[in-house]
Amino acid sequence: AQSVTQPDIHITVSEGASLELRCNYSYGATPYLFWYVQSPGQGLQLLLKYFSGDTLVQGIKGFEAEFKRSQSSFNLRKPSVHWSDAAEYFCAVGAFGSGTYKYIFGTGTRLKVLA
Amino acid sequence: ETGVTQSPTHLIKTRGQQVTLRCSSQSGHNTVSWYQQALGQGPQFIFQYYREEENGRGNFPPRFSGLQFPNYSSELNVNALELDDSALYLCASSFDNSPLHFGNGTRLTVT
């Protein structure tokens, strides 16, 4: 079955510290992978995507993610967190099936940043 | 470029009522998808429209229906509302299978 797991429901880091958010997926073919960020009361904003090629992808706001096929993972990283990064982060896999293309999302990781 | 816009932003309905949510796609996009995000959960795929035809549906009952118009705007209709329908409803548009661009959602509360 196709699924996305984000093991960490909440993460708290200090401003300036590094960040890694974990994402594991289950998908039978080569996945299309995404990270989105959602601020309170807002929709989802695309941070970065992986379709093929270089397994280390760069996104907006200084974020990057690394696709590791052997571990079925697509972890999101940022070297130095800013207070404005506090939000909820969703990992998603683009899944083909039954003639359609849909996104399967994880349950999200809520990031809190301490001043 | 105009992004995805949704209306209304908030809505309160009573169980058993019907509701219509609206979405204007981002300029140049031909595909619209709707997602339901319950509190504390990730978004769940409801259905997708391409060229005014539904071309995929998630695990939602037929009382969830939609329309896509020639200008690529879209509606989500929910009949016979249930308490569990309370959620944030997100519209997303794309050009074919390019990454989804989401609106800010409509918060529906069913009492």
Image (cartoon, rainbow, N blue to C red):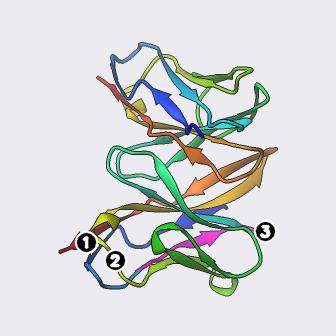
* B78 on left or right of A12: right
Residue to which mark 1 is pinned: A113
Residue A62, numbered circle: none
Q: CA distance from mark 3 to mark 1?
A: 36 Å
Residue to which mark 3 is pinned: A29
As displayed, is residue A27 above or below residue B103? below
* A25 on left or right of A7: right
The N terminus of chain A appears in which quarter of the rendering?
Answer: bottom right
Q: Residues within 10 Å of mark 2 (few under 14, many from 20)?
A: many
Query: Is-magenta flag for residue B1?
Result: no
Q: CA distance from mark 3 to mark 2?
A: 33 Å
Specify the quadrant of the image occupied by residue A30: bottom right
Which residue lies most toward the front here?
B1
Q: Are marks 3 and 1 in contact (CB under 8 Å)?
A: no
Secondary element at image label 2: loop
**A108 or B98, which is in the foreground?**
B98
Q: Provide the residue span drawn in magenta.
A: A20-29
Chain name for mark 2: A
Chain name for mark 3: A
The amino acid on which the numbered mark 2 sits, given as a three-letter code, is: Val
Could you say where residue B101 lies in the image, as x and y percent from the top left?
A: 59, 47
The amino acid on which the numbered mark 1 sits, given as a three-letter code, is: Val
Q: Are marks 1 and 2 in contact (CB under 8 Å)?
A: yes
Q: Residue at x 56, y 77 (%)?
A: A65
Could you say where residue B105 lies in the image, as x and y percent from the top left?
A: 45, 37
- Mark 3 or mark 2: which is in front? 2
- Mark 1 or mark 2: which is in front? 2
Residue A81, numbered circle: 2
Q: CA distance from mark 1 to mark 2?
A: 8 Å
